[in-house]
Amino acid sequence: MSDSSRTDLLQGTLDLLILKVLVPGPMHGYAISQRIQQVSRDILQVQQGSLYPALHRLERRKWVKAEWAASENNRRAKYYRLTAAGHRQLEEELSNWERITSAVSLILENT
Amino acid sequence: MSWLDRFRGGRFERDLDDELKFDVESRTQDNIRAGMTPVEARRQALLSLGGVDRTKEECRDGRPLAWLETVAQDLRYGIRGLRANPGFTLIAALSLAAGIGANSVIFSFIDAIFTRPMAVSRVSEIVHIITTSPESGFAGVAGADYLDYRSATSLAGVAAVDYRGPVLTINGVSERTYAEVVSDNFFTLLGVEAATGRTFREEAEPSPAIVLGHRFFQSKFGGDARVIGQAVPMNGGMVTIVGVAPASFRGTRNDMAADLWVPFSTWNQPEEVHDRRVPEFTVIGRLRPGVPISRAQQELTNIASNLARAYPATNKGRSVRVESDREHRMRAAGALGLLVMTLVGAVLLLASVNVAMLLLARAETRKREMAVRLTLGAGRARLVRQLLTEAALLAGLGAVAGVALGGVLIRVLPPALRLDRIAPNLDFVLDSRVLLFSLAVAAASGLVFGVVPALMSARADLAPALKGAAAGAGTSAARARARNALVVFQVGVSLVLVVVSILLARSFRNALEADPGFRHDNVLVLEIPHVGAAGTGRHDLLYRQIADAVRALPGVRGAAVAMRPPLGGSGGGRTEKILLPGPRQEPVEVGMSVVGPGYFSLLGSPLLRGREFDDHDGFSALKVAVVNQTAARRFWPSRNPIGKVFRTGGANGPAWEIVGVSRDARVNSIAEARGPYLYFPFAQMDSGDVNLLVETAPGAAALVKPVRERLKEVDKELVVYSSFTLGSLVESALDEFRVPAQLAAALALMGVLLATVGLYGVISHFVSARTRETGIRMALGARPADVLGSVLGRAARLAALGIALGVVLTLAAGKALASQLYGVSAGDWSAIASASALMLLVALAAGFVPARRAIRTDPAVTLRQE
């Protein structure tokens, strides 16, 4: 709850990334962070300190659902799955994101 | 993992741990796959995780009811912290217990004597109607005015009350009672139901009736309900006991519980209820539901101004004030209540400041712990909350201990202070109102001592604290400054307490030494019944016989009758409106008494001029009067009043010739301003009550029995309601100075003790923080005296600042204090000087112990310490 300005800025984006990464299927926290890193070609490195609070937040908002399952190497891991509400939220955030990025690029190109 | 986890429970925590553990392990394996050694792989994984606690904390924070768990955890941690430092906890809790306990008890006294609301239904609708006039300030309401106020439409009803002392005969024993004589609608208007039997019928009781007070019913009738419906003799007639009031209802006054209630229809005094002259009734109204008090005020003001126009002789200048029950009782508590509450509040403030200083000192030693927790990721807000929780715990502990202490004090103090003489029949209890007050007080004090240290701790600089450096910490200096400011404040407040207690003690001494204007050793007073109006022959003869008969007893040196003894305690007293001859034809209201022959010589107060009454001043003889010095000076300035005449009862009333001038004597209280006073002879003026004053050889009380027996011989029907010594009346009159002086002395003592603890703590800290410096100085050749001087100088400087603050506070409070003082002014410099000297001495004494410790330290040891 402290340092709100920093997390607010990151929060929306991180939430969007997590939701997007979860579209293909359930994943555990570590996989989510690895996946974001991979796909962004190591540009975006998600700190656990941000990731896990974000996951718990999304879970409380019922956009993801968590359940314990065996991992690829047969360990107990907590998997997050996108819910119907999460899908809707993702749609909304995606269109938001597009509006903002196009607005930003308009400014960058035309001034 | 961390020590926090022990206090966490449940699946959530285990899951969170597992989840993060899984993350670390997966990362470690990836690192090994990437070619790291297992050890390095795990180290990197842990590093990337960052602050585990902070991550966990953030995961927890948003959970529903997370705050509840945090509070529970703070509480558990706080309790552990308090238990780990029993010395600290004990001192803090004791300080608070003293402060809170004293506040609870004093509040319960003031609440019981003054401010507790009447136990009636919907008390918020109850209003008190008071006559205000330029000459007498606040007064009751004249009977006829009360009858006119009944027409107010904003009020659902109006009831009148008069305070009387009828004599009730129970099982053959006659006894003076304290009765509220009330309009018949009294109980229905207040909505008070009888506990047993019934209350009065609203329209008018068909036959003489009384309702008993609960306590009176218990003590005189043993709580036997069969008494309901019985007739008992009262004032020579018979009245039927129709009911008993509930225990909670004590009547209209807090300081006097009514023994019984008598309806107007039974008391039968139509002339007084229709009299417009003397505003003597207590009048209570009930607002119609939903009607604001301002409307009633407006309406009654209109009625009052109409009355002033219609009856200028009596009502000119009279106005009316409507106040809520609450306002009314707060006004009754007045300056004295405020003063005592302020003093006891100051003691609590001192206690709170002590705890604040203890917490600051503890924060100093916990610096490292706090810094570690902050770096491990605990939020600052969380730390503040943790510290506030500890403060709240301490406050709670203090409240519990304080109320327990209050429970003891409330049993011990009233008899020790002899409060029963100020307010008889009062139960001092720690009821829900008092407990609520204590709780509020504890919460307020918790805020006072909790917030500052908590905020200061949270602002702590991390790096130096972590390095364990005692020097260099900026917050240590800030904390030291805060402690110094607090201790200066403490000294200031204690100084005010000490000055006030000195002033009150001096007032008490002045009152003790004041000449009441009469002698009071070895004088016995016996209250006897009124036996008919003046001039009925029997009256004349009887009182002459009584005095003569008693005078003949061995051991008796003199006897005289009087309407009331001086300082008779009932307050008020009777007045007459007198008319002086000459152009100034305005009647003047003057206090008066009715006395028999020998009254003045018995009181050792020979007349300054003229003679006192003797047996020749009979009913049909020339009407004569004695006036006091002030009356003589005021009404007959620079002339000899002997032989002058004044009239009572208007221009055509009887004329009284002045035959003597007496010394001024105190009438109602020791501190009262001297006023004009008149004496009329017993044979010529009707006296309501009769008191027989008997001057005896030393040991007055022993003569009560023979005097009583002699009275029986004179007249079989004569009874004595009560007997006491004149000395006891003077003592009671001194109570209004004694009780505040004793309370203030006790509170000042507490205040000084608390300030001593504070000073000791600050100086101790000053010394221990400079152990090293002292070591160096002594190694370089400083003498012990130099070190001692520097420590004591420190104490003296703090005390001086505090004294300066205290003097300013005292002078500012002077005006509020003035009304409670007698013969000494609120800004009395000698009192301020002695209090200042005391505080300085206390500061030096508090500084001496740590100072000695400082000079005894071995320089070598202190230097090696770091």
Image (cartoon, rainbow, N blue to C red):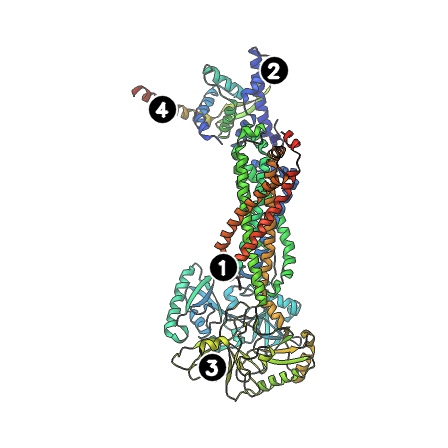
Q: Chain of mark 3?
A: B
Q: Secondary structure at mark 4?
A: helix
Q: Residues within 10 Å of mark 4 (few under 14, many from 20)?
A: few
Q: Mark 4 touching mark 2, by CB under 8 A?
A: no
Nearer to us of marks 3 and 4 is 3
Indicate the position of residue B689 as horizontal and vertical percent values: 57, 77
Q: Is B38 situated above or below B711?
A: above
Sort mark 1 into few (<14), some (14-19) or many (20+) by Cα contacts within 10 Å: some
Q: Disc 4 residue type?
A: Arg
Q: Which mark is residue B39?
A: 2
Chain at numbered mark 1:
B
Calculate the distance from the C-alpha at mark 2 to the C-alpha at mark 1. 76 Å
- Characterize the local packing of mark 3: few (<14), some (14-19) or many (20 or more) Cα atoms within 10 angstroms: few
The one of B782 and B319 positioned closer to us in this rendering: B782
Same chain letter for marks 4 and 2: no
In front of the other: label 1 or label 4? 1
Residue located beneath label 4 in the image? A99
Q: Label 3: which residue?
A: B640
- Residue B568 locus on image (x, y percent): 57, 72
Of mark 1 and mark 3, the one earlier in the sequence is 1
**Amino acid bearing label 1:** Arg
| Quadrant of the frame with the C terminus of chain B | top right
The residue that disc 1 covers is B326
Q: Real-space Cα distance between discs 3 and 4?
A: 109 Å
